[in-house]
């Protein structure tokens, strides 16, 4: 079977024109024809910047997909009974039959919260383990978070897809540790440098899809159809199992 996966940091729907527009985000995903999508920087009733929208639910409803959300930041709201949250989301054309959410703790209230979303997706009778994350800029926390993800994945016998905004450069120590265990799809089949940030004039690769060695990478592409939609460009990969 072949599946198409996408990782996309949507910057809470705010584009390079400073406009928050989820229709553009949904259109980029729809046109990519991706089956499984990992989203970073997603707001859920978070603030005025995103009109207190439950963004992941809105996009999932628009695209008629299954959804799991993992909050990296949760704040009690004075305005309503809804918790103000921000984090990662997993969308899928196929049933998401199980989820686990791992919130990475940091002792400093000054650093942005981070989390790992772990979803199990069933395609026909085969289970796939999907990890969606957005790692810290802090080197010490980044190492702890990536080590945790690797240790979680080593316990698994199912095909594994790990994706998100990793805030690291290819060839770095963290990247080498990950590629010792998994395939970097861009490293296998990507053309040119694979830059995804900033979207209008990309000059660095922050967004990655890593897959277990029992998956064959058929294609890898940075999506440039609507660069104004977010400050990151999405990355997609076609995989064969």
Image: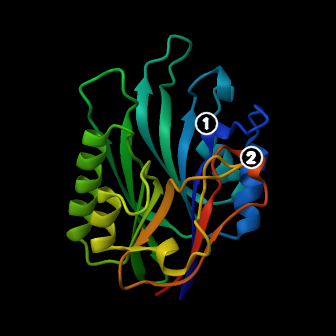
The location of residue 2, given as percent across then percent down, is: 56, 85
Asked whether the viewer can see residue 93, the reply is no
Decide which of 37, 231 is in the foreground and name it: 231
From the viewer's perspective, tell me whether residue 174 is left or right of residue 1.
left
Asked whether the viewer can see residue 129, the reply is yes
For the residues labelled 1 and 2, the Cα–Cα distance comes to 18 Å
The colour scheme applied to this rendered structure is: rainbow
Q: Residue at x 50, y 19 (%)?
A: 81
From the viewer's perspective, tell me whether residue 99 is left or right of residue 15.
left
Total tally of numbered discs in the picture: 2
Q: Residue at x 30, y 42 (%)?
A: 139
> In the figure, 58 relative to 20: above or below?
below
Task: Give yes or no for contact between labels 1 and 2 (Cβ–Cβ under 8 Å).
Answer: no
Nearest to N terminus: mark 1 or mark 2? 1
Helix, strand or loop status at disc 1? loop
Q: Viewer-nearest of labels 1 and 2? A: 2
Mark 2, Cα crowd under 10 Å, few <14 / some 14-19 / many 20+, is many
Residue at the spot of label 2: 229
Q: Which mark is residue 112?
A: none
Decide which of 201, 52 is in the foreground and name it: 201
Residue at the spot of label 1: 54
The location of residue 130, given as percent across then percent down, is: 41, 65
Mark 1, Cα crowd under 10 Å, few <14 / some 14-19 / many 20+, is some
> In the figure, 108 relative to 218: above or below?
above
> In the figure, 229 relative to 125: above or below?
above
From the viewer's perspective, tell me whether residue 84 is left or right of residue 35.
left
Decide which of 7, 71 is in the foreground and name it: 7
The location of residue 134, given as percent across then percent down, is: 44, 47
The location of residue 205, given as percent across then percent down, is: 53, 56
Helix, strand or loop status at disc 2? helix
């Amino acid at each position: 079977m072949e599946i198409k996966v996408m990782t996309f940091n949507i910057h809470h729907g705010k584009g390079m024109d400073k406009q928050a527009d989820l229709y553009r985000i949904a259109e980029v995903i729809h046109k990519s024809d991706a089956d499984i999508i990992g989203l970073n920087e997603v707001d859920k009733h978070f603030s005025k910047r995103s009109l207190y929208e439950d963004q992941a639910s809105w996009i999932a409803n628009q695209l008629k997909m299954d959804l799991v959300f993992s909050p990296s930041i949760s704040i009690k709201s004075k305005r309503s009974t809804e918790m103000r949250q921000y984090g990662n989301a997993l969308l899928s054309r196929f049933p998401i039959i199980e989820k686990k959410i791992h919130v990475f703790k940091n002792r400093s209230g000054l650093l942005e919260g981070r989390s790992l979303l772990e979803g199990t997706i069933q395609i026909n009778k085969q289970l796939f383990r999907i990890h969606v994350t957005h790692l810290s800029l802090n080197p010490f926390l980044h190492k702890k978070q990536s080590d945790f993800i690797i240790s979680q994945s080593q316990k698994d016998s199912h095909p594994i897809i790990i994706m998100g905004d990793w805030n690291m450069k290819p060839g770095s120590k963290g990247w080498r540790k990950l590629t010792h265990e998994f395939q970097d799809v861009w490293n296998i089949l990507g053309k040119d440098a694979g830059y995804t940030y900033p979207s209008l004039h990309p000059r660095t690769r922050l967004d990655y899809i890593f897959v277990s060695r029992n998956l064959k990478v058929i294609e890898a592409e940075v999506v440039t159809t609507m660069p104004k939609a977010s400050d990151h460009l999405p990355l997609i990969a076609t995989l064969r199992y």
